[in-house]
Image (spheres, rainbow, N blue to C red):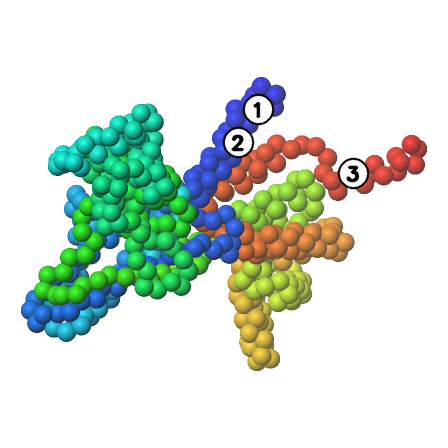
Amino acid sequence: MSVRSRVPFYVFVFLLIVAGISIGTWRHIELGIPWMTGEQRPVWMIEARVDFEGQGDAAEVSLRIPEQPPGFRILSEQAASPGYGFSILASGSGRRAEWTKREVSGPQTLYFKGQFVPDDSVGQAPPARPPKPQTVFWEEPQATAVRELLRQARERSSTPESMTRELIRLMQPDNRTQNTTLLVSEDNYLQLLVRMLNHAGIAARTADALRLEDARRRQQLLPFLQIYNGERWLTFDPRTAEQGIPEHLLLWRQGSDSLLDVVGGDNSEVSFSMLRQTVPALQLANLQASSNGLSVLGFYQLPIEEQSMFRMLLLLPIGALIVAFMRIVIGIRTSGTFMPVLIAVAFVQTTLVPGLVAFLSVVAIGLVLRGYLSSLNLLLVSRISALIILVIFITAGLSIIGYQMGFNTGMTVTFFPMVIIAWTIERMSILWEEEGAHEVLVQGSGSLFVAICAYLAMSTPLAGHLTFNFPELHLVVLGLILLMGQYTGYKLSELRRFTPMKVYD
């Protein structure tokens, strides 16, 4: 085959490898499936506790809950409220958890729990429609003080973000003037910022956030400031003017909607507790895929029995790659082309040592019985059929003997493919008659060596993890096998023929 005629072949192999790696990378990024086994991911369990006093009448409790907090992905939500009806209501202003009960009296405690997974790819959700600044009216002398502060902030800024930072700095105690002293008090500071920014034509609102610290109880929400810059909402610390959401900060409420509404109760309050957990990354990826409908892209939706079957079948390409490399590049002779793969699959089920003992026992006894069948001068079909039956009897006998001796692994010999073993015994018998015992030993030991190498590759936890969770990587294996199929050079085992030439160097 000329170089030019091979170009489409190499392009096809290249596309196979690129497709396999690209799809695997996409699955890793979008679904969060880890490349390595045993990876752990942090998950924050946050519990909101609502306490109130029932008045002996019907009660309705409504709590604002996060919709899409930036930097986090909501994994699960649940409520612990015996005797209460519970539902999550979504509206244009956000999501609320609602509890209802016909008659409530005395102290009441309700719980809302959520699991939040840190995810830097989750950003601030854009609003459905661009918000407009609210109209604000001021009375004198506050109106004059507001105009003067906004003028100073506007002169030192060029964007809504910079103006917000400058206004916050002007409102700090160290920079306060007569105008700020007139306007600012501890109770109205944040609401005053929101009103002044809206008066300046910048849509602004408040936000409440939780500072995540492991094993903390009875925590309260921290107030923050948000402005709309024409594209998205930006978050500011109203005390330091720092822009952005600090690490380990979860925005629980965004907007002016009330945090907690209680109808039919008094003395209501809400507090938060949090706990940092770790879960296997693969389990987390499966849960996220199920929640967003992407589970159809994997084997996770199949019954457990079928998943177990595919876990074994998807290891076969790894064994095929090992066999192709050993035969084409190394040059090891085996009995049959892919008999070592089947032996390796049996070894995966039986473990290596019991599998070797079972395989060698079956083949050795089968060779003795095959010698007797050859003396009967049977036709090939009858001889193979009889040999299959004898192999079944041999494996059954070994299983019974192993069980009686207390070796449960003796029963796993049934994982060996009966027909293939029968053909192997037949091929070895013919090879013995035609080539002698030496060739039988060479091919038999070669088959076992390749099978052991394939078993070592297939039995690693990483191989099972990648083949099952990233089945598209088999396209890469296919491409490598096709490339090896084009190899026509010397096998490594043939280089020993050139050893005598070293004497004459």
Residue at the image position 41 percent from the left and 60 percent from the top: 214
Mark 1–mark 2 distance (CA, rounded to whole Å):
11 Å
Q: Which mark is residue 495?
A: 3
Residue at the image position 52 percent from the left and 24 percent from the top: 8
Which residue does the numbered mark 1 point to in the structure image? 6
Q: Earlier in the sequence, mark 1 or mark 3?
A: 1
Mark 1–mark 3 distance (CA, rounded to whole Å):
27 Å
**Under tag 2, what secondary structure?**
helix
Query: Quarter of the image holding residue 497?
Result: top right
Q: Can you say whether 115 is above or below 478 in the image? A: below
Numbered circles on residues, count: 3
Q: Earlier in the sequence, mark 1 or mark 2?
A: 1
Q: Can you say whether 110 is above or below 430 in the image? A: below
**For this view, does 426 lie left or right of residue 132?**
right
Q: Which residue is nearer to you in this view: 375 or 479?
A: 479
The amino acid at mark 2 is Val
User: Can the viewer see residue 180?
Assistant: yes
**For this view, does 195 lie left or right of residue 430?**
left
Mark 2–mark 3 distance (CA, rounded to whole Å):
29 Å
Q: Which residue is nearer to you in this view: 30 or 11?
A: 30
Residue at the image position 37 percent from the left and 50 percent from the top: 249
- Picture coordinates of residue 469 (x, y %)? 45, 49
Q: Which mark is residue 13?
A: 2
The amino acid at mark 3 is Leu
